[in-house]
Image (cartoon, rainbow, N blue to C red):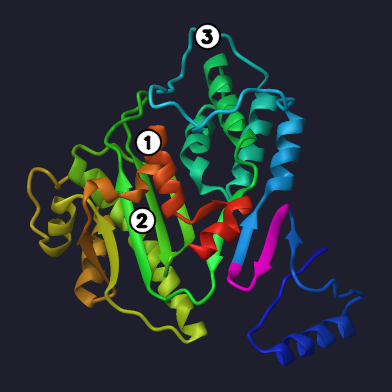
Amino acid sequence: MDDIIFGSTNDSLCKEFSQDMQSEFEMSMIGELNFFLGLQIKKTKNGIFFNQSKYCKYLIHKFGMENAKHMATPMSTACYLDKDETSQSIDIKKYRGMIGSLLYLSASRPDKMFSVCMCARFKSNPKESHLSAVKRIIRYLLGTMNIGLWYPKNSTCNLIGYFDSDFAESKMDRKSTSGTFHFIGSTLVSWHSKKQNSVALSTVEAEYISAGSCCAQILWMKQQLPDYGIFLDNIPIRCDNTSAINLSKNPVQHSRTKHIEIRHHFLRDHVQKGDCVLEFINTKNQLVDIFTKPLPKKTFFAIRRELGLLDINDLDKWVTH
């Protein structure tokens, strides 16, 4: 191990830990954290800002796209990728390198998570159309290198989960894509976009599977929070599907739900225990759409802002506002 990060709300504990480590290992204290494995951290009196602008510049230079045209969004709303077996194959090593680099950049850029995960599905046999989609993501980064996650000071400690899914949008196997994310107060702390393992036979089934993934992450986070003196129950999980909410309360198996795997029904058990509760949110306010489908520019910008993704040059203006 070359680097280690540690911290505490008590300065004396930090000093004690540092002394113990230095007595056992040959190491030195660099000081307050500002850069770690490509992740830049800027601390201000109002909060902490995370981004990866240096890594982003390196990525763009590595793939020779410094002079490419900027794009407003990472993926066009008209883009629907499939195997494209009639198109010409491309250098698989280069394609996988581009996908790997973009996935690492997702540590501070959830706004491109869906697009990168979509392109990653074709890394076993990439075609020209897939490479064009990846290049568009990099062209989007050209104009947004300074964007990162803002964590304001004195944010509340409420834990809130959101989930959503498309329905059978994958042309190859008609599997749905789940999207979830979690806020602590107004800060985004966890996000997820993944194609489901099984084919859903209804929108209710696709949504309920997404709800199970969201609940599992909620339970894990709930178990960690007591270490910080935070104890939560009835944690809200928000979705825009009333049928999925009703299913969590009513275990009756009917024609629309009989194919849902039993493992997803643990959600109902935890709702009954009071660990979490499903709440309805209007579709137009469903922020998880950014993790399940390509969005038009106006909608994409609005959701990106709601997730706490800001440009470092606009940080002072936003904090003042």
Residue tagged 2: 213
Q: Bounds of the magenta span?
A: 38-47
Q: Where is mark 1, residue-wise? A: 293
55 or 126: which is nearer to us?
55
Residue kind at label 1, given as amino acid type: Lys
Give above or below for 281 relative to 167: below
Whole-percent x and y of residue 48?
Answer: 61, 66
Q: Nearer the viewer, residue 53 or 318?
A: 318
Quarter residue 100 falls in? top right
In the rendered image, is residue 129 in sight? Answer: yes
For marks 1 and 3, give the CA distance: 24 Å
Residue bearing the label numbered 3: 87
Marks 2 and 1, the one that precedes in the sequence: 2
Give the vertical position of 224 relative to 211 (above or below). Answer: below
Q: Specify the principal SS of the magenta part.
A: strand
- x and y, in percent, of residue 20 in the image: 82, 87
The disc labelled 2 sits on which kind of residue? Ser
**Which of label 1 and label 3 is nearer to you?**
1
Left or right of 269 in this view: 32: right
